[in-house]
Image (cartoon, rainbow, N blue to C red):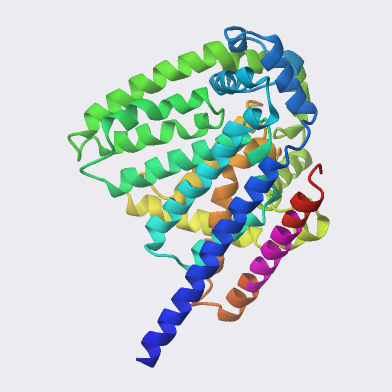
Amino acid sequence: YPMTYNKLLHNNKLHFAFYLAVCFYLFLCIVRYINAKPLWLDENFILDNLKNLGFTQLFGPLQHSQGFPRLYLFLIKAVSAPFGYNVYMLRFFPFLAMVAAFFIWLSIFRKEEKEISFGMLLFVLSWCGSSFMSRYCAELKQYSIDVLTAALFTRFLVDQGERAGRGAPMLVYLLMPSLVLFSYPAYFFISLPVYNLALALKSDKTAHRKFYLYCVSAFIFIIISLYYDVRFTIVDKGLSSYWNDYFISFSSGYELLKSLSEGLRNIFVKWYLGHKLVTRLMTVFMPWALIYIIIAAFRSLKKNRGAVYSPEAITLFLLIELFVAASLKLYPFTGERVTLFISSFIFYAIIKSILALKHRLRLVYLAFAVLYVLILVNIAIYLAFLYLFLPTV
C-alpha cells in the first residue's frame, strides 16, 4: 500500500506539472497573439503583396523578393481582406497552425509513452522554453505551418507503422501530398510515405491501391506547386542572394566543415533563446542527441525492415535531405526560421538522449535533466515577462 500510494502521489504531481506546462505554453501563444505586435519588415512586404496583388496574381511572382506558399497566402488574403487586413486576421492562420502542431506532436509522444511521463513534461517545457515556438505563432510568416506540416507527416508515418494490415483511410493518402501547396518543407517528407508503401507491396495487398493513389496525388500536387509557386521563388534573384550564405559551401574543406558545423549547431541549439550563455549550455546536449538519432534511427530501420516509421528515422532522413538540398543550393541549411520545422524533432531527440542515460549513467542523467529543466523554465518565465510587459519587442 505505501508503494502504491507513493506511486499515485508521484503520478498526480507529474500530471499536474504536465498540464500546468501545457497551459503555460498556450498562455505564451495567446498573449503573444493578443499583443498585436507591429508588423516588422518581412511582414510588411507580405502585406504589400496581399494588398497590391489580386487573388490570381498571388500565384505568380511576389513583390519584394518574397517566398511564400501561394495557396496559404491565398487563404490568408481571403480571411483578412474583408477585415481590412487587420493584424489579428493576418496572423490568425499562423496562430492556429502552431497550436495545432503542438497538440499533434503531443499525440505522437503520447502514442510512444502510452501515458503522461517525465519525457512528455520535458517535451512541453521545450516548447515553453523556445522563443521560436511562441514567437512564430503570431507572425505573418509561413514557419508555423511548416511545423504543422512536419507534425502531420510524422503522425501519418507513425500511423503507417502501427496500422500495418489496416492502414489509414484512402482519403488521407489522397490529401497528404497537398501539403506541398502550403509548406515548402513538405517536399522533404512527401517521398517517405511512398517509400514505406513500396516496401510493403509484397506483404500488404492493400498497399498497391494506396501506393498508386498516393503517387498520382503527389505527382499532381507537385506539378501544381512547381508551376504556380516554386519556379518563381527559385528564379527570384533577391531571394537567392539573401539565402546564398546559408547553403553548404564546397569552396574549401574549411568552408565545408564551417557551414556544416554552423548549420548543425543552429539546428540543435538555436531554438531556445538568442543568448550566448543559453547557446553554450544547450550545445552540451548536441552530441548526445546526434548520437542518439543515429543509433535509434538505425535500430528502427532494422526493426521495420528499412521502413521509416519512427521520429528518430524521420529525423535522420531530414538531416540528410537538408544537407543534400543545401549542397545543391535548393534550400538553406543554416537559417533558423526556414528550418523551424525540424525543431520538434530536435526537442524529441534531446529528451530521448537524456532519458536513455537513466539506467546507465544515473548521475549524468540527473545532471542533464536538472540543467535542461532549469534552462527551459528560466527562458519560459523570461518570455512571459517579455510578452506581458514589453509587448512590442
Estimate the x, y position of residue 325 in percent, counting from the top left.
60, 31
> Residue 196, can we see it?
yes
Residue nearest the viewer, comparing 134 with 119? 134
Q: Is residue 284 visible?
A: no
Query: Is 4 above or below relative to 141?
Result: below
Question: Taking 328 as reference, is 127 above or below it?
Answer: below
Q: Quadrant location of the C terminus?
A: top right
Residue at horizontal 58 percent and vertical 61 percent from the top: 21
Point out residue 318 in the picture as x, y percentages from the top left corner: 53, 41
Outermost residue on the left side: it is 205
- Front residue of 297 and 128: 128
Seen at 57% across and 7% down, the residue is 56
Numbered disc total: 0
On the image, which quarter does residue 64 sit in? top right
**171 is higher (above) or lower (below) than 317:** above
**Rendered-image quadrant of the N terminus:** bottom left
Which residues are the magenta region? 370-383
Which residue is drawn at the image coordinates 21% and 37% (left, top)? 202
* Residue closest to the eye, 323 or 146: 146
In the displayed structure, would residue 114 be above or below residue 98?
Answer: below
Residue 241, given in percent of the width and then of the height, sits at: 77, 22
- State left or right for residue 142 relative to residue 292: right
Residue 177's spot in the image, x, y percent?
Answer: 42, 27
Residue 34 lies within the magenta run: no
Residue found 39% across the figure and 92% down from its top: 2
Q: Nearer the viewer, residue 102 or 341?
A: 102
Question: Looking at the rendering, which quadrant does residue 208 occupy?
Answer: top left
382 magenta-colored: yes
Q: Residue most toward the bottom?
A: 2
Determine the main secondary structure of the stretch shown in magenta.
helix
